Image (cartoon, helix red, strand yellow):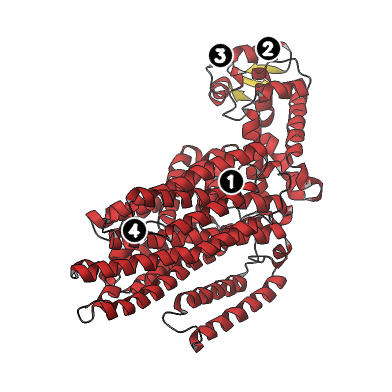
Amino acid sequence: MGVARRMGAGVGLVIGALMLGMLLAALDQTIVATALPTIVADLGGLGELSWVVTAYMLASTVSTPLWGKLGDQYGRKGLFQAAIVIFLIGSALCGLSRNMGQLIGFRALQGLGGGGLMVLAQAIVGDVVPARERGRYQGFFGAVFAVSSVAGPLLGGLFVDHLSWHWVFYVNLPVGAVAFAVISSALPQDTDRTRHVIDHLGIVLLGAAAACLVLVATWGGTVYPWTDPVVIGLVLVAVLLLVLWWRVENRAAEPVLPPHLFRSRAFVVASLIGFAVGFAMFGSLTYMPLFLQVVQGVSPTWSGIHLLPMMAGMLVTSIISGQVITRTGKYKIFPIVGGAVTTLGLYLLSHVREDIPVLELSVYLLVLGVGIGMVMQVLVIVVQNAVGFEDLGVATSGVTFFRSIGGSFGVAVAGTVFTSRLTDDLVRLSRTVRLPPGVATAVQSDPTAVRRLEPEAMAAFLTAYSDAIARVFLYTAPVALVAFAAAWLLPEVPLRETTRPVDLGECYGAVSTQRSSLREVERGLWRLADADMRRDYYRRLGKAARLDLPPGSVWLIARLGTGGGQASTELAERAGVTVEEGRPYADLLVTRGLARRTDGGGRLELTPAGERVAGVLVAEAREGLRRMIDDWDPARHPGLRELLDRLPHEMLGSASDRPHGA
C-alpha cells in the first residue's frame, strides 16, 4: 500500500499503461494465428509453423513464476520496465526475421518479456490501487483478456492484408513505448520488499523438461522416426529432468510447484482438464486460419472474422457459467457438459472439406467455443475450493500453468499430425496426378503456391490440405474426451465464499502467475465486501451495533473513526453527495454528542463517545468478514488474522458505498 498512498491522481494513467502492457502480451498469443500462412509463404518452413506459437507460450509460461518472485523481492517498477524492453526487442527482431529459425528464437525472447508483462501488471495493481477499489480494476484486466482473445485473430488478418505480416510484431513498438514512458514517469519506485528463496533450479528443470517433451511431440514421426535415437534421447532426457525436478521440489523452501499438490485429487483432475482445454483451444486457433486461407482462399482478415464464432462462444459461456456458479454454488456440471461439447466441436471440425459452407463451419466453431468456455471458468474455482490456505496461491498458479503447457503441446502435436498427414497425402497424390517437378517441396515452403497449379492438380492439393487439417481435429478430439471423462472425477464440495467470484482474466489468461495465498483470500474477500455493501450495508451495520441512527450517520462515524477528522467538503466528495445533502446526518451526530465541528464548522471529528461507537462498528465489520472466511480457519493463520484486523479500517467509509441513498 506504500505506493498507493503516493499515487494520487496518477492511478488512472498507470492503470492505463498496465492495461496496454498486458494487452500486448495477451494479443501476442492469438494475433499471430491468422498471419501464419502468410509468414510461411514468405519465410518457408511449413513444418516449423507450430513453433512460432509454441516458442512464445513456453517461454512466457515457464518464466512467470520467476518474474513474480523477483518483483516481490526487488521491486516491480524496474522489472516491469525490463519486461517491456525485452518484449519490444523481441517484437522488433521478429519483424526483421529472415527465416523461420530466427522467428522462432525471437518469439521465445518475446515470450520471456510477455510473461513478465502479465504477472507484474497484475501485481502492480495491488501496489497502486487502494484495496477497496481493486475488484473494479481487476475487472478491467479481465476485459483485456477477453477482448484480446476475440480481437487477436481479426487484427492479425487486418495487418497482413493492409500492411504486411511484419506489422503483427511492429505494432507492439509504439504501444509498448507509450506504456514504458507512462510507467517511468507516473509510477513511484516501490519500497516494499518480500524476501523469497527463489526456486531457480526448479524453474529451469521444469522448463527444460517441458521443452524436451514438446520437441518430441514436434519431431516424432516427421523430422525423425519415433524410434530414432534423437527422439528416444529427448524422452529419456525429459524423464531424467522431471525426476531431478521432483527431488529438487521436495527440498526447495519455496517450490515453483509443490509435489504434495499432486496428492490432491481436485488439483490433479483440474490440471488434467486444463491441459486438455489448452491443447484443444490453441491447436484449433493455430491451424484453422491455414485451412481458411489456403484451402478456402479467403483473405487473412476474413479468416479472423471466421474465427469470431469460436471466440464469442468462449466469452459468452464463460461469463454465464461463472454467474450460475456464483448463484448456485454448483460447478461440476460445467466441465462435464463443456468437455462433451468440446469433443463434439472437434469431431465436427474433423469433417471440414474444401467446399464446406461458411455457415456450417461457423456452427462447428461456435460449438467448440461454447464447450471450451464452459470448462475454462471452473478450473481455478475447483482448486481454490479444494486446497488449504497454505497452498492457495501455488495451486492457483499450478492449474493455469498446466493449461498453458497444454496449449504448447496442442500446437506442437497439431503441427506433427498436420505435417505427417500432408506429406503422406502428397506422396500418394504424386502417383495419380501429374505434377510439375518439385511442386511438393514448393508447396511445403509456400502454401499459397497451390493457387498457381493447374486446375486438376490444385483441386487434388486442396483436398490433401483439408484432409490434413481435418486430421488435426480428429486427433485432438480424444484429448477433449479425456477432459470429459476426468470431469466426472472432480469432487464437488460446498464452495467457500471467497472462491465464488472469478475474474474473466482467470479463464482467458494463458500464462500462470505466481500467486500469494493471502492475496487470493484478500481479493475474494474484497469482492464479497463490495457485493455486501451494495445491499443497504450501513443500515444493517448500525442495527447490528444497536445504533438508532440513519445509514448516512453510521457511514460518517465509520469514516471518521477509521480515517480521523476530515473537512466537510472532503466527506461529501467521498460519499458522492453535496455538503448540503450530507449536513443533516452530521448535525444528528453533533446533537447526540458523537461528533463536533471545528475550524469554524468546516471540519468534523468524533468525540470520545463517537470513538467508542466507531470501535463497535469496526468490531461488527470485522466479525462479518470473519464469517466470510471462517472456512479458511483464520485462527490458525496469523496472516488471515492480520487481514481481518486491517480490512475493516480500509473498507468502512470508503468512496463507493453511497450511504445517503439508503
Q: Decide which of tag 1 and tag 4 comes sooner along the chain.
A: 1
Residue neighbourhood size for the residue with mark 4, other residues' Cα within 10 Å, grouped as few (<14), some (14–19), many (≥20): many
Vertical position of residue 165 compared to residue 232: above or below: above
Cβ atoms at labels 2 and 3 below 8 Å apart: no
Is residue 333 left or right of 479 when viewed as pictured? Answer: right
Vertical position of residue 582 compared to residue 274: above or below: above
Relative to the observer, which residue lies in front, 627 or 570? 627
Kindly identify which numbered label has been placed on residue 245.
none
Residue neighbourhood size for the residue with mark 3, other residues' Cα within 10 Å, grouped as few (<14), some (14–19), many (≥20): few
Q: Residue furthest right?
A: 635
The kind of residue on which mark 3 rests is Glu
Q: Kindly report the distance in space between the C-alpha atoms of the residues bearing marks 4 and 3.
A: 56 Å
Kindly identify which numbered label has been placed on residue 588.
2
Q: Nearer the viewer, mark 4 or mark 3?
A: 4
Cβ atoms at labels 4 and 3 below 8 Å apart: no
Residue neighbourhood size for the residue with mark 1, other residues' Cα within 10 Å, grouped as few (<14), some (14–19), many (≥20): some
Q: Residue at x 36, y 73 (%)?
A: 422
Q: Secondary structure at mark 2?
A: helix
Q: Decide which of tag 2 and tag 3 comes sooner along the chain.
A: 3
Cβ atoms at labels 1 and 3 below 8 Å apart: no
Is residue 645 left or right of 199 when viewed as pictured? Answer: right
Q: Nearer the viewer, mark 4 or mark 2?
A: 4
- The answer to whether any part of residue 214 appears in the image is yes
Q: Nearer the viewer, mark 1 or mark 3?
A: 3
